[in-house]
Each structure stands twice: as structure tokens, then as C-alpha cells.
């Protein structure tokens, strides 16, 4: 993939500013910015954006978008697992007034306690960063396939209640992030072949037709339901992503 929206840059300091946890994989910063840029290019106009991450984990994807992406007014994160949501709140709080300064002070204290220059570098980065957007944000527990729970989490997500403009999801993978069975029908028939198709079918019921969905997976491709044409497909290293319009998915 050729990067069109995210110039090469060293994001090591930003990575250090963001809170993360072992076993909780996150998307690289540059890839996050690139995929969001591509998705925005497919929106009819570039509106003040509401972005939803239905597998938000530690909230890194959303926070990166708020820090580096302009014109974002609302970020909504949901995840089936409540455990990472405290991390997500910590990360998203960086976008609040004084959030980066508070994180810089924490990092300074860590640098002093552990005599580690990397913390001091991260503190400098936190002090230097100016968020490109200052969105409101919320996080909530919701299985992406539980439409009622997700609808509740998204209520009031955008000023006109039109719902998210852009969905960006790094589909679950790895030991701590397996695709959880749907709560009400864990034992029901689930083809179980790949998470992408089922995830997409579920989230699209909550989106208006023009919205753009970006789903990222590990492997060669992210499957779409039969007959659904993507806007774009990209491959980067061991990841694949598909960009698809909600309306196309709904008709598929
Ligand atoms: C690859 S991680 C996403 C990382 C996230 N983008 C971040 O910035 O930290 C995948 C996430 O999907 C969540 N997940 C797994 N099954 C889910 C489901 N059925 N509905 C919603 N989230 C789910 C996991 O709990 C995990 O946090």
C-alpha cells in the first residue's frame, strides 16, 4: 500500500504517551491515520466527524485519530470486554483540556522514579503535542453483535443523532482478543470462519447508508458478504483492510 494521507514520521514518542497493556495489540499510528484519511475521502462531504470503534480496546485508535485528525467532533468506543476500558478512558482523556499536561506530569514522575530517559522523552512529547481535534468522547461495554447494547452506546453519538460517519475497527485477534461469542446465542450456529463478515453484518444495521466502515484484520483479506463490493482493499505487512460503504453492506 502506498501511504497517501499519512506521511512517514517517527511516532515512537506518541506511542510512549499512549497507555497500553501487554497482550492488547493496537494498530500502528501511521496506518490508523492512513485508513481514516482514505475513509474520509469516500465521504460525500468531509463533515465534522463522528467516529465509532466497535472493538475499541485501550482506545488507542480513537485517541490517535483525535490527536492527529482534524475535524473530529465525537469519538465513541465500545468493546465486549470491560477490562481495557479504563485504559481507553485514560487515553481519551488526553484529548480533554489539560489532558496532555497531566500525562506529561505523570511521565515526569515516572522518569524521576525509574531514572528512565524514555519517560522523559515521552513527557516532552506530551507537552509538545497539540491535539488536531478536541472531540467529546465516550466508551461503553457492548458486544459488537449485540445491536441493542450498541444502539444504547451510540445514542446521542452525533449532534443530529444521525450516527457515526466513520467506523474504524481493528478486528479481534490474538490470545487476549479472540472474537467473543455473542452473548445471547453462544451455542447457536455461528459459521465461525472469520470475524469480519459477521462483524460487518452487525454494525451496519446501526449506520446510515453513506457511512464508511473500515475493518482491519490479520491475514490476506477481510471477507465481505457475497456480492458486496468494497470501496477499497489494502494490504500492509501481515494486515489486510477493507473499506466499504454501509449502504452497500446493507444491500449485500
Ligand atoms: C485488536 S483489539 C482492538 C484494539 C483497539 N483498536 C485499541 O486501540 O486498543 C480487538 C478488541 O476487540 C474486542 N472484542 C472481541 N470480541 C468482541 C466483540 N464481539 N464485540 C466487541 N469487541 C470485541 C477485544 O476485547 C479487543 O479489545
Image (spheres, rainbow, N blue to C red):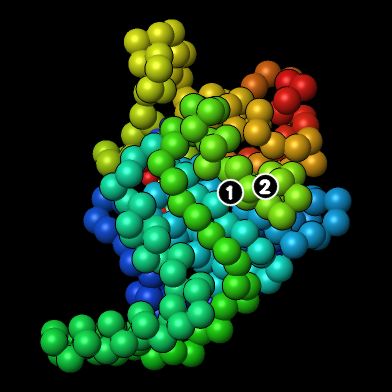
At horizontal 17% and vertical 91% (from top left) the residue drawn is: 112
Q: Going 40% across and 14% down the picture, which residue do you hit?
A: 185
Viewer-side residue, 232 vs 236: 232
Side of 55 relative to 233 (left or right): left
Q: Nearer the viewer, residue 83 or 65?
A: 83
Q: In the image, ligand 1 is in what quadrant?
A: top left
Could you tell me which residue is drawn at 40 percent across and 17 percent down? 184
Picture quarter with the C terminus: top right
Residue bearing mark 1: 52
- Mark 1 Cα-neighbour bin, 10 Å: few <14, some 14–19, many ≥20: many
Q: Is residue 149 above or below residue 29?
A: above
Q: Where is residue 74 drawn, in percent x and y?
A: 62, 59
Residue that extends furthest to the right in the rendered view of this protein: 44
Q: Is residue 52 left or right of residue 176?
A: right
Say how many tags the image has: 2
The reply to whether discs 2 and 1 touch (Cβ–Cβ < 8 Å) is: yes
> Can you say which quadrant of the picture contains the N terminus?
bottom right
Residue 222 appearing in the image? no
Residue 175 or 167: which is nearer the viewer? 167
Percent across and percent down for residue 83 are: 28, 47
Q: Considering the numbered disc 1 on the image, is that residue within a helix, a strand or a loop?
A: strand
Query: What element does badge 2 sit on?
Result: loop
Q: Which mark is residue 164?
A: 2
For the residues labelled 2 and 1, the Cα–Cα distance comes to 6 Å
Q: Is residue 225 above or below residue 166?
A: above
Q: Is residue 104 visible?
A: yes
Q: Is residue 237 above or below residue 8?
A: above
Please tell me in which quadrant of the rendered image residue 113 appears. Answer: bottom left
Q: Is residue 195 left or right of residue 200?
A: left
Residue 249: where, in percent of width, then height? 71, 28
Mark 2 burial class by Cα count in 10 Å: few <14, some 14-19, many 20+: many
Residue plotted at (58% across, 43% down): 154
Amino acid at each position: 500500500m502506498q501511504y497517501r494521507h499519512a506521511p512517514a514520521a517517527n511516532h515512537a514518542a506518541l506511542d510512549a504517551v499512549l497507555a497500553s497493556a501487554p497482550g492488547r495489540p493496537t494498530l500502528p499510528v501511521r496506518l490508523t491515520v492512513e485508513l481514516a484519511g482514505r475513509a474520509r475521502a469516500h465521504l460525500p462531504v468531509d463533515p465534522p466527524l463522528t467516529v465509532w470503534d466497535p472493538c475499541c480496546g485501550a482506545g488507542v485508535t480513537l485517541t490517535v485519530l483525535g490527536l492527529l485528525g482534524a475535524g473530529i467532533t465525537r469519538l465513541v468506543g465500545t468493546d465486549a470486554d470491560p477490562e481495557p476500558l479504563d485504559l481507553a478512558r485514560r487515553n481519551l482523556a488526553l484529548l480533554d483540556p489539560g489532558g496532555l499536561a497531566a500525562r506529561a506530569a505523570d511521565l515526569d514522575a515516572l522518569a524521576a522514579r525509574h531514572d528512565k530517559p524514555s519517560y522523559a522523552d515521552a513527557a516532552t512529547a506530551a507537552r509538545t503535542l497539540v491535539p488536531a481535534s478536541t472531540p467529546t468522547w465516550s466508551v461503553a461495554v457492548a458486544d459488537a453483535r449485540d445491536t441493542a447494547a450498541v444502539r444504547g452506546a451510540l445514542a446521542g453519538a452525533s449532534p443530529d443523532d444521525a450516527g457515526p460517519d466513520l467506523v474504524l475497527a481493528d478486528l479481534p485477534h490474538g490470545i487476549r482478543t479472540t472474537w467473543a461469542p455473542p452473548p445471547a446465542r453462544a451455542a447457536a450456529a455461528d459459521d465461525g470462519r472469520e470475524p469480519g463478515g459477521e462483524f460487518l453484518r452487525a454494525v451496519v444495521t446501526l449506520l446510515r447508508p453513506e457511512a464508511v466502515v473500515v475493518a482491519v484484520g490479520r491475514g490476506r483479506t477481510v471477507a465481505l458478504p457475497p456480492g458486496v463490493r468494497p470501496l477499497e482493499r489494502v494490504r500492509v505487512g501481515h494486515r489486510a483492510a477493507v473499506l466499504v460503504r454501509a449502504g452497500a453492506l446493507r444491500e449485500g
